Image (spheres, coloured by chain):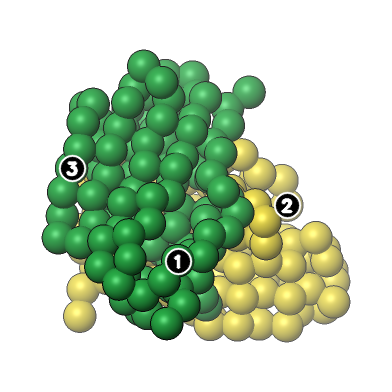
Amino acid sequence: IAGITQAPTSQILAAGRRMTLRCTQDMRHNAMYWYRQDLGLGLRLIHYSNTAGTTGKGEVPDGYSVSRANTDDFPLTLASAVPSQTSVYFCASSLGSNSPLHFGNGTRLTVT
Amino acid sequence: GQNIDQPTEMTATEGAIVQINCTYQTSGFNGLFWYQQHAGEAPTFLSYNVLDGLEEKGRFSSFLSRSKGYSYLLLKELQMKDSASYLCAVRDSNYQLIWGAGTKLIIKP
């Protein structure tokens, strides 16, 4: 089934540990995004990639890094997790800059 | 700054009609999206407006007035499965999406 796959579904992580959230899409979408969703706040963009080989910073990039080596994969890395990074993380993709976003099922991350 | 405002929560009765409003202040405008998000799930695309007027899609309609910075999502013949959060998002002049915090819609029998 075409779509976006995120892994893991949930994770409890000790502060200071490194963690990579995985995201893969098979729709051949050019653009991919990482958002975090916290209670009472709108989705906030962490990083994005308009096409393979390029990435950009969103609204809340500090503490996170991404890479886009190919069209399908867009991993998000937390180099040294802190409790404020406890959140639900959504990966999304779109065909173009003005197309609707398709979301993965999310990763629920708890940093203790 | 850029801002999207939506009511935090609304309650409606099964079979009725509900209108969820969204007002926005953004640097430029390149379209407005509505998404539905059930608890614990991913947002799913509902509608897209870039020109003024009403877009109808089955039980759901979305309206846009660019001069007023205003949109609404109209849900007719409400069903229990419509209980969800509804997210309004606007693409600004840089084609970045600005998201509202969402409106939690509670449907009562």
The percent coordinates of residue B73 (x first, y second) are 34, 48
Q: Element type at marker 2?
A: loop
Q: Quadrant of the C terminus of chain B?
A: bottom left
Residues at marks 1 and 3, CA–CA distance in whole angstroms: 22 Å
Chain letter belonging to callout 1: B
Note whether residue B93 is visible. no
> In this orientation, which residue lies closer to the viewer: A75 or B28?
B28
Q: CA distance from mark 2 to mark 3?
A: 40 Å
Residue at x-position 67% and y-position 74%: A109
* Amino acid at dot 2: Gly
Q: Which chain appears green? A: B
Name the spot of residue B76 as percent of width and height, x first: 26, 61
Pointer 1 residue: B12
Q: CA distance from mark 1 to mark 2?
A: 41 Å
Say which chain is yellow: A
Residue topped by disc 2: A63
Q: Amino acid at mark 1?
A: Ala
Depth order, front residue of B99/B82: B82
Q: Which residue is mark 3?
A: B55
The answer to whether dots 1 and 2 both sit on one chain is no
